[in-house]
Image (cartoon, rainbow, N blue to C red):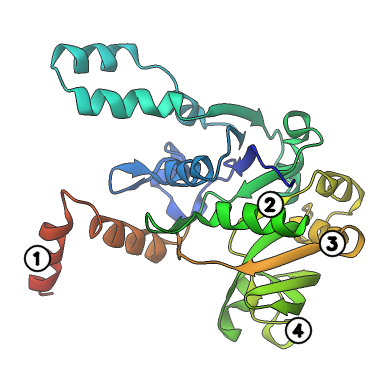
Amino acid sequence: MFKVKKAVIPVAGLGTRFLPVTKTIPKEMLPIVDKPNLLYNIEEAVKAGVEDIILIQGRGKNSIEDFFDVSYELEARLVKDNKTDLLNKIIHLKDMCNIITVRQKVALGLGHAVHCAKPVVGDENFAVLLGDEIMYTDDNTPTVTKQLIDSAGANNVSTVAVMHVSMEDVQKYGIIKMEELGPNRFKVLDVVEKPNPDQAPSQYALPGRYVFSAKIFDHLENIKPSKRGEIELTDAQTLLAQKEGLEAITFAGLRYDAGDKFGYIQANIEFALRHPELQDKVKKYLSELKL
């Protein structure tokens, strides 16, 4: 059984694309309607059966820990004002899973951030969710993390999510070289970090959802820093593919790049259009908007 009870979410980035607001506010705490974008990822993982969320943090991210901690004054005021629905939402935040924080002392890339979780993950299988990427699935569809866990369990192999992108966009992502195994399922042969279009092995990109065996840690320890001076998760995935095996699946759901300004705005609009309190007002506003 390829059980997954732990998930790693790197949250140490500086959020430079959203400066100046991210000078004092972690980009992971920027709201999508009424939730910080980090919470969408944690909820996705919890719905997939994950119990322990390991946040790889850097300096200046204390507000993330505070968000999932007890807030005595706020909870007391909500009790006094008989605002039970709001109180339950606050209590749910600290009870939904175990939040474990690990400090990434130096910024040496995504691979290094994932490796920082090794003391907590140990020899267990685990998921990785990139905080900038928000995945939406409706109530009748398993979350993207759950889809990966199910595929990894069925085939007993580490599995990553991929999506088809335009040739001009391949340079924004890690791109896989693969062999087709069946509908929407591939054997990964190689992973290339942000290739030029004329060097891309395919148009299948990694949008930030992974399920790995603990073997990935061994490979992260044995690779050399890239030209950027970083430990690249893509390089470790190539070794994992060659030695233990790695598969990729396309996923059912919508993906939003909340680390991009337009993607962030798009996510806010579309989640607002699904929000029971806002959808009618937002739809009316957009239909009447004239600029």
Q: Residues within 10 Å of mark 1 (few under 14, many from 20)?
A: few
- Select label 4 or label 1 by which is in front: 1
Residue placed most toward the observer, 259 or 146: 146
Give the residue type that dot 1 points to: Lys
- Is residue 215 rendered to the left or right of residue 269? right
Mark 2 highlights which residue?
A: 211
Q: Secondary structure at mark 3?
A: loop
Give the residue type that dot 4 points to: Gln
Q: Residues within 10 Å of mark 4 (few under 14, many from 20)?
A: few
Q: Secondary structure at mark 1?
A: helix
Residue at point 33%, 61% (across, down): 265
- The total of numbered circles placed on residues is 4
The span from disc 3 to disc 1 (Cα, nearest Å) is 50 Å
Give the residue type that dot 3 points to: Gly
Which comes before the other along the chain, label 2 or label 3? 2
Q: Position of residue 72 (x, y in %)?
A: 33, 11
Q: Secondary structure at mark 4?
A: helix
Mark 1 highlights which residue?
A: 284
Residue placed most toward the observer, 263 or 180: 180
Q: Position of residue 175 (x, y in %)?
A: 70, 72
Which comes before the other along the chain, label 4 or label 3? 4
Residue at point 43%, 53% (across, down): 18
- Is residue 270 rendered to the left or right of residue 117? left
The answer to whether the residue labelled 2 contacts the one labelled 3, judged by CB atoms less than 8 Å apart, is no
Mark 3 highlights which residue?
A: 245
Q: Residues within 10 Å of mark 3 (few under 14, many from 20)?
A: some
- Select label 4 or label 3 by which is in front: 3
The span from disc 2 to disc 3 (Cα, nearest Å) is 12 Å
Mark 4 highlights which residue?
A: 199
